[in-house]
Amino acid sequence: MMKLFGWFNAAVSKNVLRVIVGLTVVLYVAFFLFGFNHPYDEDPDFIEPRLTSALIFFVSLILLIALAVTVWAIGSSMRKRGSQVKAADGLPTSRIAAIVVALLAVMMVASFWMGSTESMSVNGKSYADTLGLRTADMFVFTSLTMMVMAAVVAALSSIRSHFRRRR
């Protein structure tokens, strides 16, 4: 196991998760407690929470950091894997990675293609940008599909390991 700053990888990831969850909880609590019912200046029928821009900035920052870490991890593993065997512990890791990437690409293309182009009302105004509507549907449907797939795989893996232990 590798160490970073004298910690094992598991300890680093656990502490990073705790910090992100803590910041998220604090920001969302502040979002709902301080100025949530602030009326929108142009139309008092709508509310404009005071911490909306802070929340958007936080989510954007987390997204950018996640993308940077993802790109770094992919590049790092590709460099390491280039000179190593394509299978680890009897598992064809390269084949599994290629299947996952291909499945993700197919899911994104299919969900973009099936996405709705019907205009919707946003803050009382019609939003009819077909690219934006389909892109939003693509991310929502792909994310939901991947979460369901992950839950099913986790459940099956748990059941499989439970029956292995009983033998």
Image: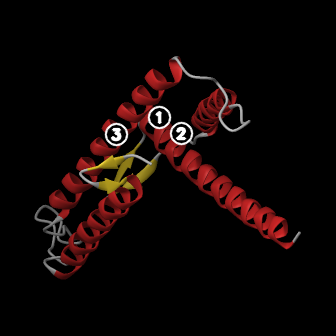
Foreground: 34 or 23? 23
Q: Position of residue 144 (x, y in %)?
A: 58, 54
- Residue type at mark 1 is Thr
Residue at x-position 24% and y-position 78%: 29
Q: Residues within 10 Å of mark 1 (few under 14, many from 20)?
A: some
Say which of 33 and 123 sits in front.
33
Which residue matches tag 2? Answer: 117
* Percent of width and height locating residue 14: 37, 63
Residue located beneath label 1 in the image: 130
Tag 3 or tag 1, which sits nearer the N-term? 3
Residue under pointer 3: 69
* Image: 69 above or below 18: above
- Mark 1 to mark 3: distance in Å? 31 Å
Whether tag 1 and tag 3 are in contact, CB under 8 A, the answer is: no
Q: Nearer the viewer, mark 2 or mark 3?
A: 3
- Residue 13 shown left or right of residue 59 in the figure: right
Which quadrant of the structure image shows residue 107? top right
Q: Regarding mark 1 in the picture, which secondary structure is present there?
A: helix
Taking the image as shown, residue 96 lies to the left or right of residue 160, namely left
Q: Is residue 60 visible?
A: yes
Tally the marks: 3
Question: Neighbour class for label 2 at 10 Å: few (<14), some, many (≥20)?
Answer: some
Three-letter amino acid code at disc 2?
Thr
Which residue appears at 14% of the width and 75% of the height?
Answer: 38
